[in-house]
Image (spheres, helix red, strand yellow):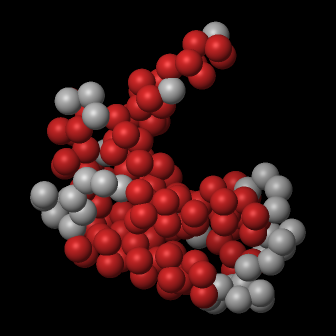
């Protein structure tokens, strides 16, 4: 397995193995949000920032760690584990329902830095421009009934 997870993604994509592609893209979406500055985080959450962030941006890190079946480099596994620990360590002053200012709490700084480091370890800059296409195609291939019913 190469040091950069994204290099392997093209192999899975070329062999029509869309599940790991989707998992990597969904992880990257979560990491990209967690890496954003506080003001961008607050402005991109539609409702309760704690609930939305937990379910849509933090749980995907744990889902990836527990459900990704492909080989994973130890540095990335460790960094994602560190990030998950930081997510769980946010206390009530840094993680409150209906508080859009929570992202400005100082405890978010190490979480952001760790998300940035995880993206770097993944080599995400190599695929970021293709993220939307990869997500859509992977979802269409893995969930064709859903996409047919939406037409």
In the image, 137: left or right of 36?
A: left
Q: Residue at x 21, y 59 (%)?
A: 71
In the image, 6: left or right of 92?
A: left
User: 112 above or below 4?
Assistant: below
Residue 57 versus residue 34: which sits nearer the camera? 57
Q: Which of the 4 quarters of the picture holds residue 12?
A: top left
In the image, 149: left or right of 92?
A: left
User: 106 above or below 14?
Assistant: below
Q: Residue at x 41, y 48 (%)?
A: 23
Q: Residue at x 33, y 45 (%)?
A: 20
- Residue 65 seen by the camera: yes
Residue 146 versus residue 126: which sits nearer the camera? 146
Question: Residue 150 in the image: x percent, y percent?
Answer: 66, 16
Q: Quadrant of the N terminus?
A: bottom left
Residue sitting farthest toward the right? 98
Residue 35 versus residue 68: which sits nearer the camera? 68
Q: How many marks?
A: 0
Q: Which of the 4 quarters of the picture holds residue 147?
A: top right
Q: Residue at x 40, y 65 (%)?
A: 65
Residue sitting farthest toward the left? 2
User: 84 above or below 56?
Assistant: below
- Residue 31 seen by the camera: no
Q: Quadrant of the C terminus?
A: top right
Question: Residue 32 in the image: x percent, y percent?
Answer: 49, 59
Question: Residue 13 in the image: x percent, y percent?
Answer: 26, 33
User: 79 above or below 7?
Assistant: below
């Amino acid at each position: 397995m190469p040091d950069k997870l994204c290099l392997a993604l093209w192999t899975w994509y070329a062999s029509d193995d869309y599940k790991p592609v989707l998992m990597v893209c969904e992880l990257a979406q979560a990491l990209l949000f967690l890496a954003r500055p506080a003001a961008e985080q607050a402005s991109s959450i539609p409702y309760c920032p704690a609930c939305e962030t937990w379910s849509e941006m933090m749980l995907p890190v744990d889902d990836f760690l527990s459900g990704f079946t492909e080989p994973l480099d130890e540095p990335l596994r460790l960094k994602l584990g560190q990030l998950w620990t930081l997510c769980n360590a946010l206390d009530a002053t840094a993680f409150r329902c209906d508080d859009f200012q929570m992202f400005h709490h100082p405890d978010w700084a190490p979480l952001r830095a760790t998300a940035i480091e995880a993206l770097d370890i993944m080599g995400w800059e190599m695929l970021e421009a293709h993220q939307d296409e990869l997500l859509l195609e992977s979802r269409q291939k893995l969930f064709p009934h859903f996409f047919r019913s939406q037409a």
